[in-house]
Amino acid sequence: DAGVIQSPRHEVTEMGQEVTLRCKPISGHDYLFWYRQTMMRGLELLIYFNNNVPIDDSGMPEDRFSAKMPNASFSTLKIQPSEPRDSAVYFCASRISGGAVEQFFGPGTRLTVL
Amino acid sequence: GEDVEQSLFLSVREGDSSVINCTYTDSSSTYLYWYKQEPGAGLQLLTYIFSNMDMKQDQRLTVLLNKKDKHLSLRIADTQTGDSAIYFCAESSGSARQLTFGSGTQLTVLP
């Protein structure tokens, strides 16, 4: 398996633009997590899905952020409109339910909002 | 809410042992983890320990858990320059096992 795939790897945009980050989890994994990494706040959970259903979005910073999972192999995290303080590395991770312990992380998308 | 704390920096000489410490507050944590992040890369799981264990050894890595004090440590024996990275402590609880991370410890291995 190719692991968790994220695109784009780098995104530079201007304040006010819409940004869409994409994630393909490992096939067969039924949990999908979005995390954000910043110098100020470290790694924080934004939202997670189970079987394509959003379960906990309490970490989503504000209404400008939205996430969807239309099917088991694809998720998006959208920021509209983007602001400079959204600049961060966004990670997607997936896990299989049951006894599995490990979350597998993608390489991340480095977002810069100018 | 849950909180996980780590010291920010550690420097060691190549060949020495490294010990990275972590404290957490959530007494319901079921698993505790150590992740490694190299520059520009994602997070790689190094090892984990179940909360009812007090030690786990995996090759050069030794994890010690003091559940009473909510203290976790990672010892890396014979530290190499390739071990230079950021090490994150994390805890999980609940059925989803979503992770709460510490701030990360930047390990620098000097030749």
Image: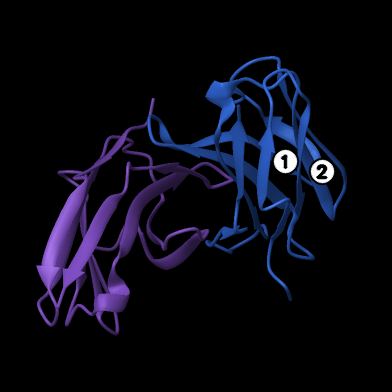
Q: Chain of mark 2?
A: A
Q: Quadrant of the C terminus of chain B?
A: bottom left
Question: Image height check: is B11 above or below A70?
Answer: below
Q: In the image, are marks 2 and 1 on the same chain?
A: yes
For label 1, the crowd category at 10 Å Cα-Cα, with few meaning under 14, some 14 to 19 and many 20 or more, is: many
Q: A103 or A74, which lies in front?
A: A74
Q: Is residue A16 rendered to the left or right of residue B101?
A: right
Q: Colour of chain A?
A: blue
Does the residue at mark 2 contact the one at mark 1 (Cβ under 8 Å)? yes
Q: Secondary structure at mark 2?
A: loop
Residue at point 60%, 23% (across, down): A58
Q: Is residue A39 rendered to the left or right of residue A50?
A: left
Question: Image height check: is B10 above or below B92?
Answer: below
- Residue beneath disc 2: A52
Where is residue B108 shown, x and y percent of the image?
Answer: 21, 63
Chain seen in purple: B
Q: Chain of mark 1?
A: A
Disc assigned to residue A49? 1
Amino acid type, mark 2: Asn
